[in-house]
Image: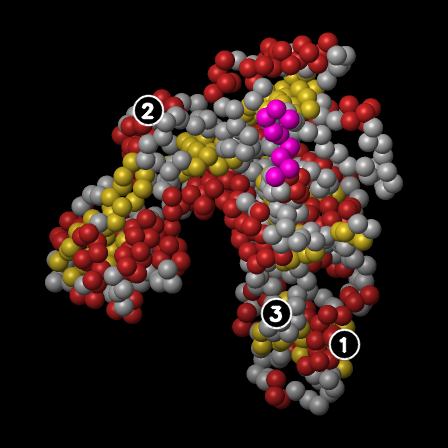
């Protein structure tokens, strides 16, 4: 496909050019369907070197570039995120790029000077009220002096004696390769930086579908989560998992405050709850916060009491994300309705007494009370359980009673499962839209205006695609999280389980008798860690660890260990052998740990180098069987064993017309051996890299269709 060409505005300073060009190279590498051209220009802040930055306009460094974006002369602009006004100029949209540099501020002195040698009343160059306040605490007798110019000019003024010290952002110095000028790093607790310090922000014209698509690759789906009622125990496991992964949690005035204990300590917690007549924040401000953090690339959880879709203002928050093309998902949960009925014995459905129920609020929009009479109740949606086979008869009866033929109707099959799908129509034709195979999953019939609405699932990078994850259970959470972040649906079907061997346990007991331990897969590392724990091995006596790199080394890091030897790139067996050949000494005792599927070729190569090798099968790959094959749009294979298990259980004909993602060369080879092929592999043999490659491919395909 032909690359889309984007003219990208940037300030013309050396720092701005360096950081913009670096970001554009990364963008082009991740989205090869796009070509970005940096267009350097001056900003008001570059032309006016006299105005004190503490008194300058918010758009001092962004105004001219963004005006050119609005006029169409530029497609987009890249700014330092801390320079971008909040809110941005009308007509613009934006997002942060994910590659953050160190956010701390630093103190810089002239070469050869030390902080203990500062004069009694040092002249300190500052460019913000925040830095001035810090300096007055740190150096109470200091004179605060405004400082202007680019980084090089500020350093020159310092070196020429205009100032005794200056405060700057570390990110600027690092990007310019001037880290050696840093005299002291200021701890974040002593001088908290602006949220955007170290980040870059890309601005574009609001509604530009090309950049909405590009942004979908860099933002994560917002999660609207049901907190349940009464206590944290009424919250689902899926919501708890989302809380544990979040960067920002915007939460209501929950009764179960223990839920917030699941939010990571470093994550932001923002109370936005309301009680009757008392609002912590107005609804428009809550909605704006959700959109703001999502565009920054944060993993946002909007935690609501009860179920977010029942009197929870969810529709307003979702509609704002829809307008911006930002992805989201909703996790349902227990409501006060079910807690007050099922929880007390006042069951809403009881054979011989009640076949259903009506629920509504007497409150109208803006306050006040609405009628709850028969006419108002007649306008409520109707939900029919266990009604699929009776859809035609139900429709006939409702039409005979006078219901309009164009009243929306929908049947949701497999509600709450990863196989959920919806058949839509009107009350007059919904029965005709059903096929016999629709009866395989239980269905719920909805009739009324609400049946005409739906969440937009195509907003994320994966556009709501169902991604079948065949990897072992230990990788499922990581893979499913990546799929959800990119706006896909994770279809979790581990096809293999890893069973540790008795031989592996024996090797762990004598681990200190080896010179090296060689590990070449993340699964081997996980079994290695599990067995070390089980035999209570002294980890201080673990010998030199050899890794093939990539995901294997990351798994070692998760155990608190590090690879002593690994290839610089190309994380395959051949590259590892090249790396080890000059390091192996005759008579070295090496423990090679692998699965029953990995083969003995690496151990043989080490023996040929003169080493004594114990080739230990650490674990076996056992297949997991399922009654039926799931529906999916793409499939991710994380091992050759998963490929073999898939082919044995369902046959590789099932992947025809689907996108096939493989984690690395052995998995690709397993597919080719069976007459299939991988459409995509990640640049690194990791779960995250593989799912990221799928997301980038989806974005590139959608960009090709943008005008």
Disc 3 crowd, CA 10 A, few/some/many (<14, 14-19, 20+): few
In the figure, 621 relative to 527: above or below? above
Q: Nearer the observer, disc 1 or disc 2?
A: 2
Residue at 37% in and 38% down: 494
- Could you say which disc has been placed on residue 651 in the image? 2
> Can I make out residue 585 in this image?
no
Q: Nearer the viewer, residue 361 or 15?
A: 361
> Can I make out residue 560 in this image?
yes
C-alpha distance separating marks 2 and 3: 55 Å
C-alpha distance separating marks 1 and 2: 73 Å
> Disc 3 on helix, strand or loop?
loop
Residue at 55% in and 30% down: 415
N-terminal-most mark, 1 or 2: 1
Q: Which quarter shows the C terminus?
A: top right
User: Which residue lies under the disc numbered 1?
Assistant: 145
Q: Nearer the viewer, residue 603 or 649?
A: 649
C-alpha distance separating marks 1 and 3: 23 Å
- Could you say which disc has been placed on residue 188 in the image? 3
Which range of residues does the magenta coloring cover?
345-353
N-terminal-most mark, 1 or 3: 1
Residue at 77% in and 37% down: 361
Q: Is residue 462 left or right of residue 592?
A: right
Residue at 55% in and 56% down: 262
Q: Residue 481, how many percent across, how many down?
A: 50, 44
- Could you say which disc has been placed on residue 441 in the image? none
In the figure, 6 relative to 159: above or below? above
Per the image, is 437 magenta? no
């Amino acid at each position: 496909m032909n690359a889309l060409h984007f003219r990208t505005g940037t300030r013309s300073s050396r720092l701005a050019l360096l950081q913009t060009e670096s970001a554009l190279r990364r963008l082009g590498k991740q989205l090869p369907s796009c070509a970005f051209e940096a267009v350097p220009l001056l900003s008001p802040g570059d032309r006016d070197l006299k105005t004190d930055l503490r008194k300058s306009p918010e758009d001092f460094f962004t105004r001219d570039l963004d005006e050119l974006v609005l006029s169409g002369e530029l497609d987009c602009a890249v700014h330092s995120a801390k320079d971008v006004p909040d809110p941005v100029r009308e007509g613009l949209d934006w997002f942060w790029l994910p590659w953050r540099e160190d956010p701390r501020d630093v103190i810089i002195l002239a070469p050869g000077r030390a902080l203990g040698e500062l004069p009694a009343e040092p002249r300190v160059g500052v460019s913000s009220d925040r830095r001035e306040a810090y300096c007055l605490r740190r150096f109470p007798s200091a004179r605060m002096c405004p400082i202007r110019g680019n980084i090089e000019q500020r350093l020159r003024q310092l070196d020429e004696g205009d100032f005794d010290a200056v405060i700057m952002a570390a990110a600027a110095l690092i990007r310019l390769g001037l880290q050696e000028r840093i005299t002291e790093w200021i701890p974040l607790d002593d001088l908290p930086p602006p949220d955007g310090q170290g980040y870059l922000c890309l601005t574009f014209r609001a509604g530009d579908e090309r950049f909405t698509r590009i942004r979908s690759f860099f933002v994560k789906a917002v999660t609207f989560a049901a907190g349940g009622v009464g206590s944290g125990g009424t919250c689902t496991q899926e919501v708890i998992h989302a809380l544990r992964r979040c960067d920002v949690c915007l939460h209501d005035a929950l009764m179960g405050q223990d839920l917030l204990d699941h939010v990571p300590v470093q994550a932001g917690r923002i109370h936005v709850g309301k009680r009757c007549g008392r609002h912590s924040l107005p609804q428009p401000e809550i909605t704006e916060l959700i959109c703001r953090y999502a565009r920054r690339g944060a993993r946002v959880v909007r935690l609501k009491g009860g179920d977010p879709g029942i009197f929870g203002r969810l529709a307003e928050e979702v509609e704002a994300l829809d307008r911006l093309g930002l992805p989201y998902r909703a996790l349902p949960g227990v409501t006060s309705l079910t807690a007050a009925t099922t929880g007390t014995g006042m069951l809403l459905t009881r054979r011989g007494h009640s076949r259903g129920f009506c629920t509504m609020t007497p409150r109208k929009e803006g306050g006040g009370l609405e009628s709850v009479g028969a006419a108002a109740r007649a306008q409520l949606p109707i939900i029919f359980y266990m009604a699929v086979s009776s859809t035609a008869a139900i429709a006939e009866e409702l039409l005979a009673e006078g219901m309009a033929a164009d009243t929306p109707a929908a049947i949701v099959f497999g509600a709450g499962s990863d196989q959920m799908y919806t058949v839509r129509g009107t009350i007059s034709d919904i029965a005709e839209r059903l096929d016999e195979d629709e009866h395989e999953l239980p269905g719920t019939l909805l009739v009324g205006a609400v049946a005409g609405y739906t969440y937009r699932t195509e907003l994320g990078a994966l556009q709501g695609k169902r991604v079948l994850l065949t990897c072992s259970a230990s990788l499922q959470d990581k893979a499913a999280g990546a799929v959800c972040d990119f706006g896909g649906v994770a279809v979790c079907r581990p096809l293999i389980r890893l069973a540790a061997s008795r031989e592996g346990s024996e090797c762990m007991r004598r681990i200190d008798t080896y010179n090296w331990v060689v590990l070449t897969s993340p699964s081997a590392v996980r079994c290695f860690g599990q067995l070390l724990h089980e035999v209570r091995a002294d980890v201080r006596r673990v010998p030199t660890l050899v890794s093939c790199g990539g995901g294997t080394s990351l798994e070692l890091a998760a155990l608190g260990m590090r690879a002593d030897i690994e290839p610089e790139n190309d994380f395959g067996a051949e590259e590892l052998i090249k790396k080890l050949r000059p390091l192996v000494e005759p008579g070295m005792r090496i423990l090679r740990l692998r699965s029953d599927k990995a083969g003995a070729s690496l151990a043989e190569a080490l023996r040929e180098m003169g080493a004594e090798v114990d080739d230990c099968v650490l674990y076996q790959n056992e297949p997991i069987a399922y009654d039926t094959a799931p529906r999916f749009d793409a499939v991710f294979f994380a091992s050759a064993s998963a490929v073999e298990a898939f082919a044995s259980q369902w046959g590789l004909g099932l992947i025809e017309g689907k996108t096939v993602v493989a984690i690395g060369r052995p998995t690709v080879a397993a597919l080719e051996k069976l007459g299939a092929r991988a459409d995509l592999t990640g640049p690194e043999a990791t779960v995250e890299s593989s799912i990221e490659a799928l997301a980038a491919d989806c974005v590139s395909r959608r960009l090709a269709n943008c005008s």
